[in-house]
Image (cartoon, rainbow, N blue to C red):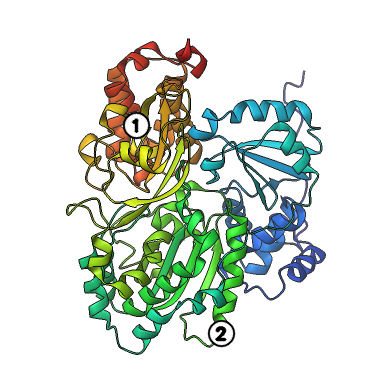
Amino acid sequence: MNTHAPAKTFKRRDPSLPKGRQVSDSDVTALADLLGDMPRRRDMVIEALHVIQDTHGHISASNIAALAELFRLAQVEVFEVASFYDHFDVVREGETPPPPVTVRVATGVTEELMGAFDLIEGLRAAVDPAKVRIIAAPCIGQCDGAPAATIGKRIYRHCTVESLLEAIENDNSTPAPDPYEDLKAYRAAGGYSVLGQVLAGEISADAAVETMSDAGLRGLGGAGFPAGMKWGFVRGYEGPRLMTINGDEGEPGTFKDRWWLERKPHRMLEGAQIAARVVGCDRIYIYMRDEYPHVLEILRREIEALHTSDLDVVPMELRRGAGAYICGEESAMIESIEGKRGLPRHKPPFIAEVGLFGLPTLNHNIETVSWIPDILANGPKWFADQGWNEDHKGPRAFSVSGRVKEPGVKIAPAGIPLIRLIEDYCGGMADGHKFKAFFPGGASGGIFPASMADRAMDFGTWEKEGGFIGSHAVVILSDKDSVHGAALNTMKFFAHESCGQCTPCRSGTDKMVRLLAEGDDDAALYNDLLTVMGDSSICGLGQAAGNCVKHLMKHFPEEFSAGSKSNEEVQS
């Protein structure tokens, strides 16, 4: 009796061909025609993937093979990049491409308060899933218009099922910016005169650095690092140097940079040009989140207008994000600009020394550079004196959303007590709602009770309490909302957005979500997990992700002990 299994047969490889997936000449030619004169460089891979996604609605295996061939990369290098970013739909052989229409409904804390999940449920019940895909998306920077959604290149605010069903039928293939101040209007109002002073030597580099330091301008993307000090550091390294502008404001609750760029993009562009000249940067790279198609269009127009004007400008390149919150971290953003996965780098070295393409790099936030022309034109005292008192310098743009009557971007003094921001700038609490809790700095800044709303909204206040003001994204919760539910929403966001590079963040955020969802109230277990995440994660995402849970246990013990509750349960 023969007990041996039948011999396996293997498909024999054609020895005349290389190993791996074969590349069709016709696919390569078609892609080359689609990309046109785009440079075939590694740092342009993400831009090329966007062209494919925008054209076909997905990225096929043959597209990846052709792109790898054109850019002289291994197919796995292209695949790992395409599969890392949320806005790329990679379709393998035999898989069905996504439907022709995709609706991304934002599901951050504010959006959940405003009914985002009910909206998603209603949409899914009303559409043909073969024609329309409904995605529960992370924050899209429209919290002041929640519930909000994107369809193609269009943004829709204050959505209902009916309004989105109507919007699906529109032509959503091109962005539609509202009127804004273009180059001609900005120059007519005196714009770029400060840059002219810098170029003429009327404002020296040393004087500009000193002015920024005296004004107290700080990084307003989250870290709050003094701008003048940063300029000095980067100037101290041997050139050539580069500059990056981080417009990837993916922190839930943050939308101030979008607000500035929708209205006055040249405040940022002139500020960037001044900073680049002072520090000695040869090129400026502006990294803008893909969730802002109208802002990307504005910047494309105005950068081209600058390059073709009579102004002497440092060359600028606009790079488009692809739906990855982690790219708000400066080194992850640099990796993305270089055409790679957005994985944060180990530090040191810091990017001021070894940054984009290995060169010393000055990185700033949109709002930070937007203040530069005004400060140099009016002097450091003009800026500093706009703070709440002598301990707090300058005005700030606060993104306020949640249970207030008038959400939106509020230009208010640095250091203003939160209760004054709510009452004096936001019209008070929404009707029928009593102030209960707040996030002072977006999802990662922690969550605090209303009893602490008399404290200064500035750097240095919330760090003492295990939080931070970060990007000044303020989310207000009321007595009708669950802090436990808000913490769970936040942890789900971080679990989704973890880049996966380090185990404490990748596994820690997932574990925290499961504990909260199950209503586990073992404080010792949570604290162990928080310690590991905070001490061992590579970057700020994992280190700060658990802040809201830490504060849930400390400031809202009754909700922590009660376990998972919905808003409806809290109301009852």
Q: Counting residues from the N terminus, which is met first, the one under dot 1 or under dot 2?
A: 2
Q: Which residue is mark 1?
A: 447
Q: Which residue is mark 2?
A: 309
Estimate the x, y position of residue 390 in percent, counting from the top left: 17, 54
- What residue sits 53% from the left and 71% below the top? 317
- What residue sits 60% from the left and 54% below the top? 76
Estimate the x, y position of residue 153 in percent, counting from the top left: 68, 53
Depicted 194 relative to depicted 501: above or below: below
Depicted 230 relative to depicted 564: above or below: below
Estimate the x, y position of residue 437 in percent, counting from the top left: 36, 28
Q: Is residue 356 left or right of residue 543?
A: right
Q: What amino acid does circle 1 point to?
A: Ile
Kind of element beneath mark 2: loop
Q: Which mark is residue 211?
A: none
Quadrant of the rendered structure where residue 52 is?
Answer: bottom right
Estimate the x, y position of residue 427 in percent, counting from the top left: 43, 38
Depicted 166 relative to depicted 370: above or below: above
Q: What amino acid does circle 2 point to?
A: Ser
Q: Is residue 95 visible?
A: no
Q: How many neighbours does mark 1 have within 10 angstroms: few (below 14), some (14-19), or many (20 or more)?
A: many
